[in-house]
Amino acid sequence: MELSLLLTFLAVSVLLTLAPGPDILFVIAQSISHGRKAGIATALGLASGILAHTTAAALGITAILYNSAFAFQLVKYAGALYLLYLAYQAVREGGSPLAASAPQKQSALRLYRTGILMNVLNPKVSLFFLAFLPQFIKPGTGDEPLQMMILGLVFLVQTIILFSTVAIFAGILGQRLLGRASVGQYVNYGKALLYAVIGIRIALAEK
């Protein structure tokens, strides 16, 4: 794989990762409400989901999802329902003001699993990688799946770095919000609204 092509892929990947979307908004929401460590754990989960999508694209599994309306709808609605469940949980948490100890309410492992499910249960991500990765591979070499896996790993690493950086800054903002009861008690409601909007967007998504 040519270095110039790899650098171009990296540059495009950074722009796509930083663009406002469900994943980065999810990291921000978790970081503000539970702290930067929670945001980083969520980011690692989302990155693990990227690895799953990349593997699926390289093996051709995503093509099955693309060609099967039933499979696409099944995964799509599962993801939407999961996010709506998270919105419900956030509403329940929002009944009382946030305290400074809120970041410890959820374990890093649980947040990591949440990040994985959030990413894996979004079929649009699978279709994105199926369409995006082949644009940067050199065809006719016989190692196209390997090239896709390498590109996927590059995307994964830069996602972890960028999302972790976002989590740190959002966590700092969250600490300031948690210190203000008049603002902190509404953070969970805002998070619930965000989850609900993302869930509805996934449910209404077309191929």
Image: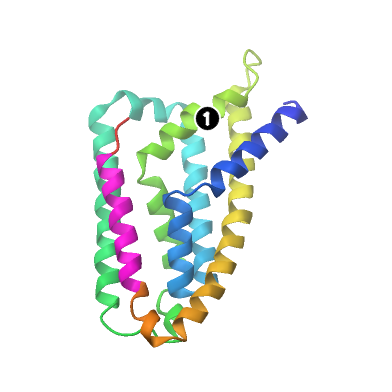
Does dot 1 land on a helix, a strand or a loop?
Answer: helix
Q: Residue lying furthest top in this view?
A: 140
Q: Is residue 168 inside the magenta stretch?
A: no
Q: Nearer the viewer, residue 153 or 158?
A: 158
Q: Is residue 204 above or below residue 64?
A: below
Q: Quarter of the image holding residue 125? A: top left
Q: Is residue 157 above or below residue 175?
A: above
Q: Is residue 195 inside the magenta stretch?
A: yes
Residue at 41% across, 29% down = 61
Residue that label 1 marks:
132
* Coloring basis for residues: rainbow
Q: Is residue 32 above or below residue 180?
A: above
How many marks overall? 1
Where in the figure is residue 124, as x and y percent of width and height?
Answer: 38, 37
Residue at 66% across, 39% down = 11
Which range is magenta? Answer: 188-204
